[in-house]
Image (cartoon, rainbow, N blue to C red):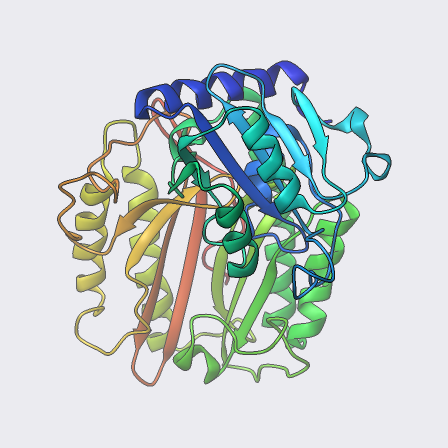
Amino acid sequence: MFFPPEEYRERWARVSDAMSAKGYEWLLVWQRGAGTYDRVGDVFWLTHFVINGTGQDPASEEIGAPYTFCAVLMRCGEAPELHVGLQEAELDLSEIVCGKVVSHPQNLMSGLAEHLYAQGVKGRVALIGDDILPGMYDRQLRRLTPQIEWTPDETFLLGPQLVKSVRELDAFRQAGALVTRALTAVMEAMMSGSTGAEAASRAGAIILSAGGGFHRIDIHHGRATDTHILTQTLYGYDTTSPEPGDLVRAWIFGPILHGYWLDPGRSAVCGKRPSSKQWSLLAGAVEVVDALVAAMKPGVTPRELGILGGQLARKHGYFDYPQLRVPLLGHGLGTNFIPFLIPLGNGAPDPTGSLHYDAPLQAGMVMAAEIFLTHPGVGTAGFEQNVIVTEFGTELLTTTPMLFS
């Protein structure tokens, strides 16, 4: 285990403090296996557990029970319980950090409902994972728990997870060094004319040989850079090669190491001989990202960063031409993409604070700065940097060159 048990206990304390602040006595956090997006990081962050069920769950209550899901049930001030739909014998309990593991091998939903009733859980219960639990299982659980008012709060863990511990920052540094090597390999391969599949295989070998993982390695070249932010291929890459002079773009994103997400991206020109128009496009996009990184420091808000980035984007023609618009210039990073977003320009009003546009950055946060910039007839360049916000500025996690020559 990368983190000692006491680190998990510190996390539970932070979650309990956040629950108390919002008036939650109970919290339920869902995880679905077989997908890195599906709240895996939240349960893993709380208990060091990932459900090993995979595939598609049974399609009805009558013929089976969900086995790719699990849940953490937490009462304010107490150690969490891990609820699974597998036999306890199928679990390695030595790798799990929690107060208790509760197995419901017959049916996770009905077993969890019975447990909640026996524990006297009623009234409002905060819920994380409302966005991933299938309607069939959600309806079943709600039908069996009429005493509970399920209250979705999908961003609740944003607060407890926002500022990383010393050990978590070490994990991010390791992940940053690893994804830097992988992204550099992709870009060198594409600039030399390799196929997207060959380039992805080089990156994948680097990450996998170090024990890491990824969600997607996404590679564009030529005219494809004009039409989509991400490729429309099933895996993110194909067996075609760029021609000399083609714009190439690559992104690697996912839980790179120890469950922590990074998502850097770069653009360049195959053959390393960009035209003057291509160089202007690439250098302009880099100027925006570099300025955002330089401006990140404690006390600065995402809205202030968005205004700065919007001004620079305007300088480089962003608002003069049709764009593949991504309505942000960055975001937070943690066990997934954290919705601590940097707007493009002023951003929307945020009177409730739910968008966090006016919440100041803090030392110990991990952030991304990015832009996609289109110049007609040239292509769309994309760049992203991942950084740690420190007391004095930023510490760069992804050091793949921004401009190749």
Residue 350 placement (x, y as % from top left) = 16, 44
Foreground residue among 264 and 242: 264
User: On screen, 98 above or below 350?
Assistant: above
| Residue under the point 17% across and 39% down | 352
Q: Residue at x 29, y 82 (%)?
A: 376
**As drawn, 238 above or below 131:** below
Q: Is residue 188 above or below residue 123?
A: below
Within the image, what quadrant is residue 293 found in? top left
Expressed as whole percent of the image width and height from the top left, the position of residue 316 reads 23, 65
Q: Is residue 346 visible?
A: yes
**Left or right side of 383 for 318:** left
| Of 186 and 133, the residue lying toward us | 133
Q: Residue at x 40, y 69 (%)?
A: 381
Quadrant assignment for the N terminus? top right
Camera sees residue 170: no
Using residue 23 as the reference point, say whether residue 190 is left or right of it: right
**56 or 291: nearer the viewer:** 56
**Could you say which is closer to the camera, residue 202 or residue 14?**
14
Residue 47 sits in quarter: top right
Q: Position of residue 89 (x, y in %)?
A: 86, 35
Residue 397 as seen in the image, left or right of residue 189: left
User: So how many labels did they put on this image?
Assistant: 0
Residue drawn where x is 21% and y is 38% of the image: 353
- State left or right for residue 181 relative to residue 157: right
Residue 363 in which image quadrant:
top left
Residue, far right: 89
Against 160, residue 222 (above or below) is below
